[in-house]
Amino acid sequence: MDILSIISVALGVAGLGYALYQGHERRKLVEYNKSEAWYLYEKANNMTGITQTAFSLYKEKYQNNPDPELIELMAKSGAFGLELFRETIRLIQLSEEKFDYEIIDEWQARGKISDDHHKALFTSLVVNHSNNAVNQNAKKA
């Protein structure tokens, strides 16, 4: 074996080792992104729930003398929270390997999705390769 062959084999082995390492790092990054998406979903869910509860309590307590500016800010906060909540569901859709009606039912059964309203937000993002999500929802109705 000449020196060129030895160098070629060494570079090939090193390249293979590096490829395996990168594959492992990629899997870790994918799992991290998935974990973060679900964490953000839980926090956004909590935030929107607290905001809605605070808004309801304020309206109940100060129904005779409401502050229009405060009501407007609380309504904007609720709308922003809901949009953030929807965005976290989209992040889950992008990070999960499987995102279909079956897995959404499984997530709801396991308690990852709390109720039917939340489930509807998930199912609205399901994309079927042969039909779009709107057609799938129409078939279920």
Image (cartoon, rainbow, N blue to C red):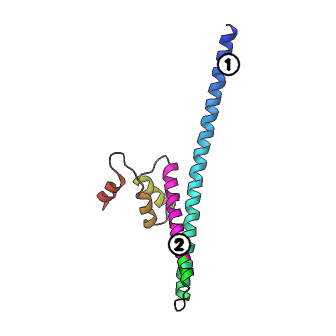
What is the residue that sits farthest to the top in this orientation? 1
Mark 2 and mark 1: Cα distance apart in space: 61 Å
Displayed quadrant of residue 101: bottom left
Q: Nearer the viewer, mark 2 or mark 1?
A: 2
**Can you say whether 16 is above or below 89 in the image?**
above
Q: Is 10 situated left or right of 98 in this image?
A: right
Magenta stretch, residue numbers = 73-95
- Could you tell me residue 59's position as x and y percent? 52, 84
Q: Which residue is label 1 attached to?
A: 10
Tell me the element at label 2. helix
Report the residue at 58% width, 59% height from top. 40
- Magenta stretch: includes residue 52: no
Q: Mark 1 packing: few (<14 Cα in 10 Å), some, or many (20+)?
A: few
What is the residue that sits farthest to the right in this orientation? 3
**Can you say whether 39 is above or below 62 in the image?**
above
Tell me the element at label 1. helix
Q: Which residue is label 2 attached to?
A: 76
Q: Amino acid at mark 1?
A: Ala
Asked whether the residues under the numbered discs 2 and 1 touch, taking CB atoms below 8 Å apart as contact, a structural biologist would say no
Front residue of 32 and 59: 59
- Could you tell me residue 2's position as x and y percent? 68, 7
- Could you tell me residue 49's position as x and y percent? 54, 72
